[in-house]
Amino acid sequence: MAAMSMNLTRWPRLAGACLALCVLSACATYGPPKLAPGASVADATRALGAPTGEYALPAGAKRLEFARGPFGKHTYMLDFDAQQRLLGWTQVLTEARFNAVRAGTPKGDVLLALGRPSETSRIALQRQTVWSYRFEDHFCRWFQVGIDEAGRVTDTGYFPDPMCEPKDPGDLVSRLVR
């Protein structure tokens, strides 16, 4: 009976260790793992899964997009040379990158810089498509890009993310007071 009791006391620790290992292994595939420069496209897709976008770069190089996170709050772009070897990677959903998007920019350049949007909507009256990008932000905003029928940026801005809008006015006050 004492041996059985000893085994039962180990279970919670063993279960906790297994849970921690599962959580850590899940996080390892969230962003680009430690892929060394020179890693192949096959190495990257094996580590991250299928890319969510692919963009041609000059001289036969290419950029692979890996959108991640809840509601697309992180997008990693991995750049490969013409021999399909990794040059580097970056997380592109940042205010610095958003602020670089200017009126007149072709939508293809926006995709190359930011990747696919979290949401797309149409404003018929303005004959405009709006691309919305969620990102890590303490103010619960998202970045939006207006694109006209010719495929060019007309305007950009930061707006409250509807996923964070309070359900009643009292919620807004409590959120502002925090």
Image (cartoon, grey):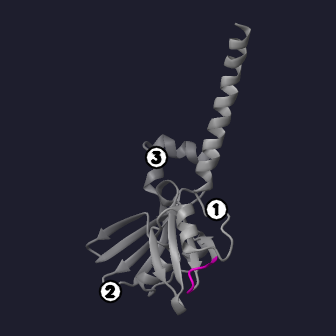
Residue 28 as seen in the image, left or right of residue 48: right
Quadrant the C terminus occupies:
top right
Q: Give 78 or 150, whichever is nearer the viewer.
A: 78
Specify which label sits upstream in the sequence, 3 or 2.
2
Q: Position of residue 159 (x, y in %)?
A: 48, 64
The kind of residue on which mark 2 rests is Ala
Q: Position of residue 82 (x, y in %)?
A: 55, 87
- Disc 1/disc 2 C-alpha distance (Å): 39 Å
Specify which label sits upstream in the sequence, 1 or 2.
1
Q: Which mark is residue 150?
A: 2
Residue of label 1: 33
Q: Give 56 or 15, whichever is nearer the viewer.
A: 15
Q: Residue at x 62, y 54 (%)?
A: 28
Specify which label sits upstream in the sequence, 1 or 3.
1
Specify the quadrant of the image occupied by residue 139: bottom right
Segment tinted magenta in the rendering: 82-87
Q: Residue at x 58, y 84 (%)?
A: 81
Q: Give 128 or 29, whichever is nearer the viewer.
A: 29
Say if mark 3 contacts mark 2, CB within 8 Å. no
10 Å crowding of disc 3: few (<14), some (14-19), many (20+): few
Residue of label 3: 166
10 Å crowding of disc 1: few (<14), some (14-19), many (20+): few
